[in-house]
Image (spheres, rainbow, N blue to C red):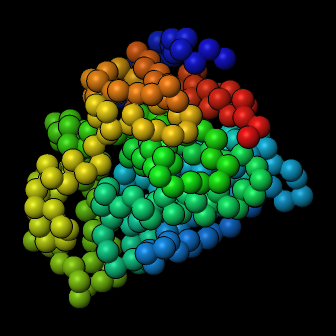
Amino acid sequence: MNLQEPFLPPPGLKGPHIQSILASARFRASGAHPVFDNAREMILETNEGVRLQGFYSPRPGKDAKAMLLILHGWEGSANSTYVRASARYFFDRGYEIFRLNLRDHGDTQHLNKGLFFGTLFDEVFDAAKQAAELAGKKPFFVAGFSLGGNYALRIARELCRRSIVRLCHVVAVSPVLDPGRATDVVDKTILYKNYFLRKWKNSLMRKQQFYPDLYDFSGMLSHSTILGLTAALLPRCSPFATPAEYFQTYTLTNDALKSIAVPTTIITSRDDPIIPVEDFYGLDLNDLTELIVHSYGGHNGFIRNYRLNVWYEGAMEAIFAQYTC
């Protein structure tokens, strides 16, 4: 499979919004499947005492090729459509699957007193390390989408300082590189702004219900933009005074990825309606990193036919097949 060959969806699926909407359309991954029937809920406790929920799908009585850890995007979950679809695809092809929920995602607001912030990297790295240990001697891969792609890239970079056993390759699909710019773009698009704002406000209200002595968000839920709500939340609930200061801590532009220490593939599209493609053109990457920029694909989409199969699953399968590490 030539990963650099142009991705060209059929005419009715070329639009960036239809691609992005179909990426999360529930019917694409509905119904029973062995990857979910065999899933074991696990609460991973990190070195700092943070508890994160994951779903581990082994292959009972069968030898697995490898294990794939899948990281969802902001306000998504381990049950987001693109996560479930990829889990089914790779489980059917002999992989064990681990789907991780980031803090406060997937109805896990009760597990930790502290709020989720994109800066919380160590807990995700620790969870990835624990997932890798479940893989034993099998190759281990990480695939992240959107904000999960940002985390995946930070994992790949962190490997120059800390190790994750048998981690062979990292893939980031439509990763957030500049969260400040992405927030501005989303706030200017009513469809996406309302979608994310509604989900974030619901999450905050659930957090308040579990920890009423710690949180009262009622005075800030009237904000009508993600940036406005972020600006109101940060001084009260984080060490950051402004959104700019906060976003900068997990921005991955320019030379931020130059020290990536494991083979890594970044996949994005020029028509992504959430992540500006210009963020990728200025990246200073080393020889371990391949950047793939397609003209079409939207955000997390890359729907390649009317059966709603996606291009990146076949691309990842081709990449992973190279490894016997």
Q: Is residue 192 visible?
A: no
Whole-percent x, y for residue 99 in the image = 58, 56
Q: Residue furthest front?
A: 161
- Horizontal placement of 194 versus 287: left or right? left
Whole-percent x, y for residue 324 in the image = 77, 37
Whole-percent x, y for residue 235 in the image = 11, 67
- Horizontal placement of 68 versus 234: left or right? right
The image shows residue 35, relative to residue 260, as above or below, that is below
Specify the quadrant that holds the C terminus: top right
* Residue sitting at x 45%, y 28%: 286
The image shows residue 15, relative to residue 81, as above or below, that is above
Q: Residue furthest right?
A: 61
Whole-percent x, y for residue 156 in the image = 49, 44
Count the labels in the image.
0
Which quadrant holds residue 18? Answer: top left
* Residue sitting at x 48%, y 73%: 47
Q: Of residues 205 and 104, which is closer to you in this image?
A: 104
Which quadrant holds residue 92? Answer: top right
Specify the quadrant that holds the N terminus: top right
The image shows residue 280, relative to residue 142, as above or below, that is above
- Horizontal placement of 239 versus 178: left or right? left
* Residue sitting at x 72%, y 46%: 139
Q: Is residue 316 visible?
A: yes
Q: Of residues 256 and 228, which is closer to you in this image?
A: 256
* Residue sitting at x 10%, y 56%: 242
